[in-house]
Amino acid sequence: MKKSKHFETNAVRTQVERSSHKEHSVPIFTTSSFVFKTSEEARAAFAEEIEANIYSRFSNPNTDEFINKLCLMENTEDGFATSTGMSAIFLAFTSHLRAGDHIVASRSLFGTTHQVLDNILPRWGITHTYVDIDMDKKWEEAIMPQTRLLFAETPSNPGLDLCDLQFIGKLAKKYNCLFVVDNSFATPYIQNPSNYGAHLICHSATKFIDGQGRVMGGAILGPESIIKDVRSMARQIGPTLSPFNAWILSKSLETLAVRMEKHCENAYALAKYLETIKEVTSVKYPFLQSHPQVKLAKKQMKLGGALLTFELRGGIERCRKFLDKLTMLSLTSNLGDTRTTVTHPASTTHSKLSPEERKVVYITDSLIRISVGLEHIDDIKSDIEQAINKSK
């Protein structure tokens, strides 16, 4: 299909070539390998002289369709589908870095990304420097002669702080660094980092791309020249997305636009509501006027996203009581579901950080993260209100 200028049409109408059976819905290609018409075709495929499916660790029609859609959505040329979001981030690092290289990364990151930077990459002589996500000057000050990669997650997890994508993109160009962005929170419907100079974009497709908490998956997207090294490494180490999961995720992309519109509508309404509750001491949501970076949010994001955080008066014990009193909302570490999910980051997703490290990125013992789902907003408010009242 010819590329449409409309996100929704590309999401629905991008499909792999129909088989001889003329199916309307793309089937699941549950095969480990593919056959060749001739020995010459097999040779040429392995020599990468022709495009051909060889083995599902390398490529598969379902993963191809999933990536083709994401490339259209993110304005990128190529990509590779991975088994999880973390495998996409790991590939972004290891496919382009070697011993002696240095990373500059925003301090406000997903807890597992911290573990990779702090405990895994140093084993291979890859070092890093953290900078405050919203302090532009610190990014340039942290760049060394051996710096090869700038890494940002925006909005951040769970603090919902923002990186100025345009500023970091220009910085990456100035110092000839690779600029990698984790775009999982925003999704390609809300934010396109490639428009601001990002070279690689990573997604945890487990989150909003799936949208229903069913399967795990990830993706890494960028120019063909850069994805070539990603694909080369991935073919050897095998962090491959299964055909079934790719089929689910490709189908999920068809409804991403309508889902994100409603997620964001509910999240904004809930954030405004929480600001009126006396027991809530602070609320953070990118499109609230009270957010310190609201102008930047509205510059690089189409909508405010589905995540918000708030702090509850009474410390960690009050938070535990609040969580235990919820009756409808789901207490889980995942996010991006049709169902509203609630998390206490300090004791779960970011518990491996020290108290000092959590303090620096504003993860307090009183912080609650909510991934706002698609239930009726009145029911979401009602469950939160009764849990706050019963936790006093």
Image: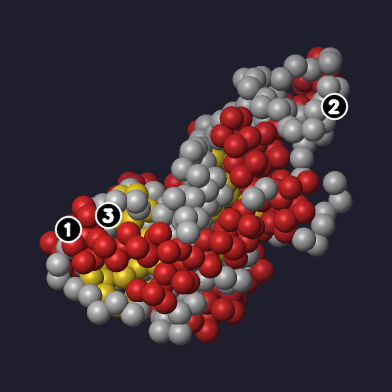
Q: SS for tag 1? A: helix
Q: Position of residue 169 (x, y in %)?
A: 58, 72
Mark 3 vs mark 2, CA separation in Å: 49 Å
Residue at 29 percent of width and 51 percent of height: 327
Q: Amino acid at mark 2?
A: Lys
Mark whose residue sits in front, 1 or 2: 1
Mark 1 vs mark 2, CA separation in Å: 56 Å
Q: Amino acid at mark 1?
A: Lys
Residue at 32 percent of width and 59 percent of height: 383
Q: Badge 1 is on which residue?
A: 321
Q: SS for tag 3? A: loop
Q: Determine crowd level at label 2: few under 14, some 14-19, many 20+ residues with C-alpha closer than 10 A.
A: few
Mark 1 touches mark 2? (CB < 8 Å): no
Mark 1 vs mark 3, CA separation in Å: 9 Å
- Foreground: 74 or 254? 254
| In-image side of 189 versus 355 (left or right) | right
Q: Badge 3 is on which residue?
A: 326
Q: Badge 2 is on which residue?
A: 22
| In-image side of 339 versus 228 (left or right) | left
Q: Position of residue 373 (x, y in %)?
A: 46, 56
